Amino acid sequence: MYKILYKEVLSDVNKLMIVEAPAVAHKAQAGQFVIIRVDEQGERIPLTIADFDRDTGTVTIIFQEVGKTTIQLGEMDEGDELATVVGPLGHPSEIENYGTIVCVGGGVGIAPVYPIAKALKEAGNTVISIIGARTKELLFWEDKMRAVSDELIVCTDDGSYGRKSLVTEPLKEILEDADRDVKHIWAIGPAIMMKFVTLTTKPFGVPTTVSLNTIMVDGTGMCGGCRVLLEEGAQFVCVDGPEFDGHKVDWDNLLSRQRYYRSEEQEATERFEQHRCHLDAAMAEEAG
Amino acid sequence: MAELTQRDRMRIPRQPMPEQDPDARGRNFSEVALGFTAELAKQEAERCLQCKVPKCVEGCPVDVRIPEFIKAVREGDMITAVQEMKVKNSLPAICGRVCPQEVQCEQLCVLAKKGQPVAIGRLERFVGDFELRQRTCPLDRAEVSGKRVAIVGSGPAGLTCAVDVAREGHEVTIFESLHSPGGVLVYGIPEFRLPKGVVHAEIDYAAECLGIEINPDYVIGRTLTLPELLETYDAVFIGTGAGLPSFLRIPGINYNGVMSANEFLTRVNLMKGYKFPEYDTPVKVGHNVAVIGAGNVAMDSARCSLRLQKARAAMTGTEPGEVHIVYRRSREEVPARAEEVHHAEEEGIIFDFLTNPVEIFGDENGNVCGMRCIRMELGEPDDSGRRRPVPIKGSEFDLTVDTVVMALGTSPNPLVFIDAEGLERSRWGTIVAEETEGRTSMPRVWAGGDVVTGAATVVSAMGAGKRAAADINRFLSGELNPW
């Protein structure tokens, strides 16, 4: 069992947890992920390692509440225990001194892009970061991102904070500025955002690494549910990735595969929320 | 009762296994074969002729003392039966259910010549199940040696090796990548063939008696590496199986609804997808399912599909649909265990022999909607000695399917080889290990089971685990150092 040592509500739907998992922390590197399971009935879901501390033996996970498992996880508190935390899985990011690089984090994708930006900064790169979300409420870690970036651009779709734009707009401007000489781009966020980032960067010919978050069961290459179509054929996100050359990804296939279990996810979420309502009502009755 | 003569014994017919009715069982995941009653077991045990030179034992990869345990069953002395069994086999409730006895012990039984071998597997299960209930014979352990052994993988090979090494007094730690031990016994083989309660009970019993520590959630190669294990442990056994699925190289394999048998079975078995939404992991099964391949994994996938279809039909009041096994060779070459094929047919699985998929079609949402196949005929024998299937020109036809499960065999998962360059592997990705002792090219590392042989059977993996354990024990006692 893996104890939750710290919990922070980053926004309405984004939460952070520091979890005791010494074996994972011992080996974790930027770009890798863990598979977690909330309880014995739980499903296995991949979450990127947002930070880790080898001395305290902890890993930090950040998640957006989108379905039954993440809502249930969000309701857990400090002192509660997760049934499974296994990892670190996947290849670490290839960190080297490229020169000037851009890190793009969208929504909950800010969490996984942070350790990469941090590692790239430590490797001597000039780090330009762009973080964005639908609205101000969904932004987090602006301070942390600023601390590891030479320049930070914040945008929201609705203009409630920072620049009113999608992340692709400032990205395009940076690429158009020949003086900047951007060598590499990392983009992590919703698949649709990553798709448009790669469409933006492709004409400039700048290598663009994306970190994919697909449906997985085991996370070790066993099920193949995470397969992604690249130009060279199907690959497994869990063991061949999670980072890929974004220009080679078949995004429409990826988006359609992410939707495959949507009706089941809805069913599970509705059932969970109903159950919770009943529970709340029963407790209120008892208290009253 | 007076002692029976050999002639009397030969007159007793082979006792049938009580089974769930095919129609009823299609609608549940409960075990199909219900197990012998004490009366049936005794009657079946009476059939054994107690051969002076028992051929059956030669057919057993772990050398179970077959005549001895059967004699004890016959005499109603179950404690002795359990003791005789456990000398060689610490997991009889599992083996009795999943061994392909018809090509092993039972094939060599003298009564097999008349088509009626002693039902050794059923008797083994009877003894194993008795012991899980009664716990009469806790496995004994030699004096603590102070030596430490790491076992990578908790499937049949790793478990068997762990038990035999721990019995010698060595301290054993098992590392398992998934959250529950058992390997293919829990993620692959379905509940209706091997109840998970039986697997867990058998593992817990052995681990408790022998002080074996089981660490789930450890992916060796990632969480810890092989060289790191060698720093802490005196010996390491790798029994990581063959967990990597294969996909046909045809167009359309990434449409939704095309999955590996590993994914499908893991969702159903390990994650208990058949109990969704009580359990969180969903599993989707279409109205028309095509399972490609005809091994045990294909039969398991087909029979799970059928149960899920019937469950849905019962809930929604619609037709359940069809499940097809699509196999490029003929019935003769089917590699699955005979009983599994028989059960699959009984339950209504449709077999499309001499049929090979060439393309999968998807609809506008990216979901599978059909599969083009071509008819095959058998040509000259190939390397495997089986007649090679060749396509019949112009015989293409389309199947309407919305789920395609690929059960085409598996290969070893390479994660365990991270940072282990000194470990020699074949071009198929399997570990090169000595056949008899399981020694690898890396000092103090042994391997056995599917990771060495490629996908095979539970009991052959157990045999390999057992032989490696004997060698590890000799090595740790200082008797030999082969490196």
Image: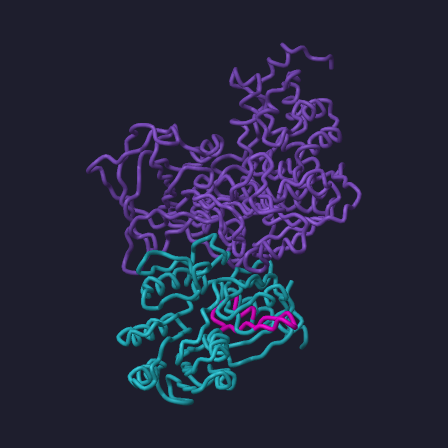
Chain colours: A cyan, B purple
Q: Is residue A92 left or right of residue B129?
A: left
Q: State the residue in front, B373 or B222.
A: B222
Magenta residue check for A284: no
Q: State the residue in front, A8 or B15.
A: A8
Residue A208, how many percent across, how many down?
Answer: 36, 72
In the rendered view, tell whether residue A11 sits above or below residue B17: below
Magenta residue check for A55: yes
Q: Residue furthest front?
A: B483
Magenta-highlighted residues: A52-73
Residue in the picture at 55% in, 44% down:
B441
Q: Is residue B167 left or right of residue A115?
A: right
Residue in the picture at 40% in, 43% down:
B408
Q: State the residue in front, B351 or A19.
A: A19
Is residue A282 visible in the rendered image? The answer is no
In the rendered view, tell whether residue B255 sits above or below residue B21: below
In the rendered view, tell whether residue B134 sits above or below residue A246: above
Q: Residue furthest left?
A: B394
- Residue B40's image quarter? top right
On the rendered image, what quadrant is the N terminus of chain B found in? top right
Residue in the picture at 26% in, 39% down:
B374
In the rendered view, tell whether residue A127 sits above or below residue B354: below
On the rendered image, what quadrant is the C terminus of chain B found in? top right
- Residue A21's image quarter? bottom right
The mark total stands at: 0
Q: Is residue B185 left or right of residue A102?
A: right
Residue B405, how many percent across, how many down?
Answer: 39, 47
Residue A19, how many percent across, how many down?
Answer: 61, 70
Residue A229, how many percent across, how many down?
Answer: 34, 59
